[in-house]
Amino acid sequence: MTLKQPIRLVSVLLTRPAMVRWITLILLCTIPFSIFVEPVSGADSDSPNVIFILADDLGIGDLGCYGQQKLKTPNIDRLASEGLRFTDHYSGNTVCSPSRAVIMTGQHPGHVHCRGNGEENTFALDPKMITLPRMFKNAGYATGAFGKWGLGITSDSGNSNPLTHGFDHFSGWKSQRIAHTYFPSSIVRDGVEQPLQPGTFIHDMIVDDARQFIRSSVSAKTRFFCYIPTAVPHAAMHAPKQLHEKWRKVYPQFDGKIGTYGAGPDDDCPPVQNPIAGFAAMMENLDNEVGSILDLLIELGVDENTIVCFSSDNGSHLEGGHDPEFWDSNGPFRGHKRDLYEGGIRTPLLVRWPAKIVAGRTSDHISAFWDIVPTMAEITGQAVPAQVDGLSFLPTLLGDEESQAKHQSIYMEFIHGNAKPYSSRSLRMGDWKAVQSSEKKLGKQMLSIELYNLADDVDEQHDVAATNAALVEKMERYMDEAHRPLK
């Protein structure tokens, strides 16, 4: 067939409206996303820029600075060697959406409106609430979010849209479900859904947009808050082809393994040959992207007074062919995503701030995602919003452990599917940890409370509830008090 023949064939098959849509698709995929940041007054000139990078389903043991042996994460490890590494930090829940809701609101899992994954539009934040990005905006910051929102449909005009809650810019997936594929049919930018050419790897586009936002903010001499909730390493185990092929050569014994996962009905979620190699490639790509952001800060001359935080929304997963046991993804901890054992909720937290944080420190301060809002409120000189349950850990960042307020307890609850009032719940009080699950996670019949002493049983193998009845009763009462029924 000659070159002209397929061109004539397309022109015959396409109606005029279809031809217009095809031309629009080509134009949208070739015009770069432009982010213009207006100069903003109000932010104190000494206030730091803030970048918060949130990995997705990354276990605490997946990073070199927390003990990973089979792959290297040198750029993420820089955040530890040049900043502060937390050893006892907790996510906002054991799955994606509620953990993100906790970050945005500062409410703990027994108070926040979202406590499990479910229908996309049920997660929208309350527009009257002062969320993390709105707090930054009130302080005079430019605000941008880049990646997986997880709190509704990002192209909607209502409360699901991140632009409704204080973000000036958004670039990322249309919904949480579509974020299961790294080759979606569209990208949403500032509320507008734009089609993508088949085979487009969206992750790199999103990080490019984040870098453009940072560059534009610095050019406008405006302080910025850049939130990057990447989907890596959530299934499916997709990665750039070159990196995937590199790691297939390292682990050829897994070439017979095929990883599968699903996304939205209109989105391609191709199977992955050798998902072990896929995970390694995803991690290398993520680490490279973190390195590119750190290099950009140095290039722009804002490295010294920019806070860079890195964490994960929950523990490692068992989906899409991923093998957390092979990678020792959760280190010494029991459990995975959807569990309230430590492996499902204890996550990395790295904070780098060259102007203020002494490099190479480690802290065992017990912190959680609901502490992010009050910490950033103190850093930016804003009032802590009324709904917040957390405590600022700024004293810990600055090395003033004696002034650091401590949590009496860390409460978690998780709803799996339609379970009521919850599928499982847990409470950490000092070194003591109570965990209670329900039969088949349905919430109808709660099982007996398990009790562990994390000081000498960090992997939660020895239930000592039977010999500590009074303590179990006390912790059960605390869990009951921490739970607020959903409306």
Image (cartoon, rainbow, N blue to C red):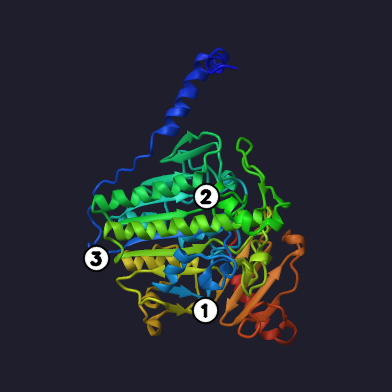
Q: CA distance from mark 2 to mark 1?
A: 29 Å
Query: Residue 389, can we see it?
Result: no
* Amino acid marked by disc 1: Gln
Label 2 close to label 1 by CB (< 8 Å) = no
Within 10 Å of disc 3 (Cα), the crowding (few <14, some 14-19, many 20+) is: few
Q: CA distance from mark 2 to mark 3?
A: 32 Å
Q: Nearer the viewer, residue 212 or 281?
A: 281
* Amino acid marked by disc 3: Asp
The mark that comes first in sequence, 1 or 3, is 3
Q: Nearer the viewer, mark 2 or mark 1?
A: 2
Residue 264: percent from the left, percent from the top?
62, 40
Residue identified by numbered label 1: 408
The mark that comes first in sequence, 2 or 3, is 3
Residue 359: percent from the left, percent from the top?
37, 76
Residue displayed at 56% across by 73% down: 67
Q: Nearer the viewer, mark 2 or mark 3?
A: 3
